[in-house]
Image (cartoon, helix red, strand yellow):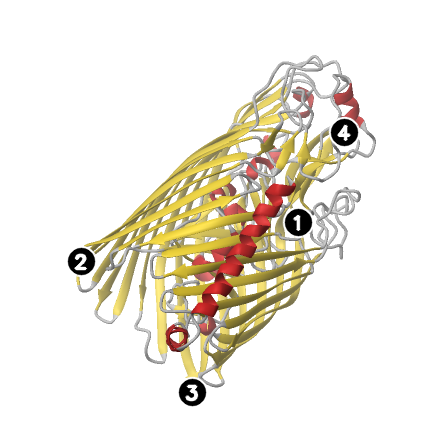
């Protein structure tokens, strides 16, 4: 092990040393000319974002938006969208049951891993809305950039963007011949990832881009019973994009993507067992448990302790996505037509009791189909008055078959017997009409306004067959329709922009956004399954100052109140822990600042700092049995920040060296509410250091060493109670230190 660690750190050192040698060889006129040629290497202030369905730069947009470029993404050594936690300050993702990520911005967002729930921080890929939490598990590759859009965005982005959105933008086909192959090996997790791209200009009006990703890794949690690292995750994905311009005024892009994900094992472990109850169950069949958060688990589903053998923990998911985007110029106006369809199926099993016996777990078979259609027309981007009007349709057919429980009997004293087999369906039809406009009232003073009307119809059914003790907790239920949920909402936004100078933007916005209600799958009775819509009211005051050459500073004050926020909480009934959703009134207020400073041709400093004070406004529920007014929200670090130093130096005509070092930090955050779970594990305050060092050789080869969490910080990221355990908790911790070698070959 010592030799292996020395080799990994030698990898970082060797790349740095190779870079230094190359610099020494490249001193002179050639290096100076190369430095001038790369003077724009750090200038990303001109990246075009589409958060407001317009082509604007980050500094032109009157909203808080953070952009993660493809290079930034590479330096994080991330494969999937459910691994984004902390990549920008204020963003927290906690992966619960079934790897479902609860995503929050500034302490606000769906804090539930209930599969039927839709996220308050919506997820978009190439302009298409993805409603369910499992959509985050798909891989991200051939990336142009990711937009992290904070605050209420319902007017333009639409359905369920009440507190923000994550928007992934992949690369479109171009008119240049391109081929690229990238290999990344991550040592600690035995990870191997290969990404490839071929871009082919077939003709002057037809371009094709094919890309793929294959990835496997073995996780960082050591399962003592199975004697292996977990979870093992394998992703296979391919995307085909075709761009066609049949005339000078029509541009069509068609994308199809297929994903195939397989996982064996899980990242959960026992975090605490204060009364030794779980350890006592295991001791009766000779197992000694590890009950501290240290990336060691003990779980299996063997026929031990008088139980019947159950399935091995697994997750599978096969996804197909189709996206057609057409832009048609109609004189000076542009008509945009976007049609999309996606479907997936995700069977899985999660072992809850965390012993080697088949005491308690959840088998699920979740499936989803969705169709979206949007059409909009936008005015020319000139003149005092600019506008956009459109319509949107969303159809969704979702279902799940959770089978909760274990064996009919056991000899270890575990009090819950039997299974609860539930079948849930949920169908949605939603129709929207929206409009936005901007008018220059006075020179450089512009008013922005928008409105969106949405009518949604949600229907569902539930049936259940239960045995053993679980039949008293989850009563047998014939096929029964849920209470129909019909909702009409009007969302709006209004704001003022003042361009004090060509480089300084001042703005103020007020927005109302809605998220639809739904049905939860953990309810004992059909009559208790529904939860009501939530409504967010957000105010933001901001300033953005461009300093030239990629340097800038942006500051925003924000205050967001959410009425009837769909709050996830754990209820324990007859010793069975259930994840439920109730409606609470909450708010978050604070300040966010970002900036970048270019230091000559070769160095750039970037930083971001978020202070978010999230609280319950009222007792929740009415009797305060979960949280009291004034208590902090879960998954809400008050302080979070990120500071990065980038370096890029041409040292000869053929060699560039580059590097980045990032320092991330976040303060303590609750993972469960204080009243009903005061002793639950929490997310500790933490600081991590990440680095990427490498060199480019000519136009065809790039070699880099990547180190994430170099200080090997350990902190809890998710925690939930273990059924009938007297206060024991299961959950997960962050990924430890990983050193990776990345090689990229281009044509």
| Disc 1 target residue | 712
Is there a contact, CB below 8 Å, between mark 1 and mark 2?
no
Query: Residue 631: horizontal and vertical position, in percent?
Result: 75, 54
720 to the left or right of 427? right
How packed mark 2 is, by other alpha carbons closer than 10 Å (few <14, some 14-19, many 20 or more), is: some
Q: Nearer the viewer, residue 555 or 693?
A: 693
| Residue closer to the observer: 582 or 596 | 596
Q: What residue is pinned by disc 2?
A: 205
State how far apart marks 1 and 3 are (Cα). Answer: 54 Å
Task: Name above or below for residue 747 compared with residue 544.
Answer: above
Q: Which residue is mark 3?
A: 443
Per the model, the C-alpha gap separating discs 1 and 2 is: 51 Å
Identify residue for label 4: 725
Q: Distance of mark 4 from mark 2, alpha carbons?
A: 65 Å
Q: Which of the two marks, 4 or 1, is nearer to us in this view?
A: 1
The earlier-in-sequence mark between 3 and 2 is 2
Tell me whether circle 1 and circle 3 mark residues in contact (CB < 8 Å): no
**Mark with earlier residue (4, 2):** 2
The answer to which of 466 and 729 lies nearer the viewer is: 729
């Amino acid at each position: 092990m010592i030799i292996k660690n020395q080799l990994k750190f030698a990898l970082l050192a060797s790349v740095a040393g190779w870079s230094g040698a190359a610099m020494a060889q490249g001193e002179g006129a050639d290096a100076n000319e190369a430095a001038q040629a790369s003077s724009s290497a750090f200038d990303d202030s001109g990246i075009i974002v589409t958060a407001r369905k317009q082509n604007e730069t980050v500094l032109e947009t009157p909203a808080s938006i953070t952009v993660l470029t493809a290079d930034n993404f590479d330096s994080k050594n991330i494969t999937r969208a459910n691994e984004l936690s902390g990549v920008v300050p204020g963003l927290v993702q906690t992966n619960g049951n079934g790897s479902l990520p609860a995503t929050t911005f500034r302490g606000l967002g769906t804090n539930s891993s209930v599969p039927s729930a839709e996220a308050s921080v919506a997820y978009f890929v190439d302009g298409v809305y993805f409603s369910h939490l499992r959509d985050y598990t798909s891989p991200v590759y051939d990336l142009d950039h990711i937009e992290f859009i904070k605050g209420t965005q319902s007017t333009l982005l639409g359905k369920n963007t009440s507190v923000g959105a994550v928007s992934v933008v992949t690369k479109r086909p171009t008119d240049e011949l391109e081929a690229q192959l990238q290999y990344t090996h991550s040592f600690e997790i035995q990870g191997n990832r290969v990404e490839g791209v071929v871009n082919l200009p077939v003709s002057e009006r037809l371009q094709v881009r094919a890309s793929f990703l294959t990835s496997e890794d073995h996780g960082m949690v050591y399962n003592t019973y199975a004697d292996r690292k977990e979870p093992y995750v394998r992703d296979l994905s391919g995307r085909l994009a075709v761009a066609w311009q049949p005339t000078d005024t029509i541009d069509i892009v068609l994308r199809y993507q297929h994903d195939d994900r397989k996982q064996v094992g899980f990242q959960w472990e026992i975090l605490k067992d204060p009364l030794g109850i779980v350890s006592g169950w295991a001791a009766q069949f000779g197992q000694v448990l590890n009950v501290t958060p240290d990336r060691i688990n003990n779980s299996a589903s063997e026929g031990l302790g008088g139980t019947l053998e159950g399935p091995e923990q697994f997750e599978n998911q096969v996804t197909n996505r189709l996206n057609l985007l057409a832009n048609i110029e109609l004189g000076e106006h542009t008509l945009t037509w976007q049609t999309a369809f996606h479907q997936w199926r995700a069977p899985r099993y999660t072992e809850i009791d965390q012993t080697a016996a088949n005491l308690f777990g959840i088998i699920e078979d979740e499936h989803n189909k969705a169709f979206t259609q949007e059409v909009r027309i936008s005015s020319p981007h000139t003149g005092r008055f600019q506008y956009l009007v459109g319509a949107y349709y969303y159809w969704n057919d979702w279902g799940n078959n959770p089978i909760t429980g274990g064996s009919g009997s056991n000899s270890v004293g575990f009090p819950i017997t039997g299974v609860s087999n539930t079948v849930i369906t949920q169908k949605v039809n939603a129709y929207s009409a929206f409009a936005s406009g901007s008018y220059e009232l006075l020179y450089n003073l512009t008013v922005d306004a928008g409105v969106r009307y949405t009518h949604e119809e949600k229907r569902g059914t539930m049936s259940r067959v239960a045995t053993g003790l679980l039949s008293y907790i989850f009563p047998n239920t014939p096929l029964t329709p849920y209470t129909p949920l019909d909702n009409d909402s009007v969302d709006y936004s209004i704001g003022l922009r003042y361009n004090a100078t060509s480089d300084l933007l001042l703005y103020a916005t007020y927005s109302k956004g809605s998220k639809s209600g739904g049905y939860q799958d953990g309810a004992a009775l059909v009559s208790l399954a529904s939860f009501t819509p939530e409504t967010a009211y957000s105010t933001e005051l901001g300033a953005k100052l461009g300093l030239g050459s990629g340097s800038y500073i942006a500051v925003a004050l924000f205050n967001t109140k959410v009425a009837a926020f769909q709050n996830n909480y754990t209820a324990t009934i007859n010793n069975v822990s259930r994840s439920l959703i109730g409606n609470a009134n909450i708010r978050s207020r604070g300040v966010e600042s970002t900036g970048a400073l270019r230091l000559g041709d070769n160095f750039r400093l970037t930083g971001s700092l978020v202070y978010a004070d999230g609280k319950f406004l009222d007792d929740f529920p009415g009797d305060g049995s979960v949280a009291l007014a004034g208590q902090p929200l879960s998954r809400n670090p008050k302080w979070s920040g990120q500071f990065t130093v980038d370096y890029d130096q041409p040292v000869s005509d053929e060699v560039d060296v580059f590097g980045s070092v990032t320092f991330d930090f976040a303060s303590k955050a609750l993972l469960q509410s204080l009243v009903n779970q005061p002793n639950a594990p929490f997310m500790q305050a933490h600081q991590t250091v990440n680095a990427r060092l490498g060199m480019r050789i000519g136009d065809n080869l790039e070699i880099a060493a990547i180190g994430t969490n170099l200080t090997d910080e350990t902190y809890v990221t998710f925690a939930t109670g273990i059924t009938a355990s007297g206060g024991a908790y299961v959950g997960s911790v962050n990924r430890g230190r990983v050193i990776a070698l990345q090689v990229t070959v281009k044509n």
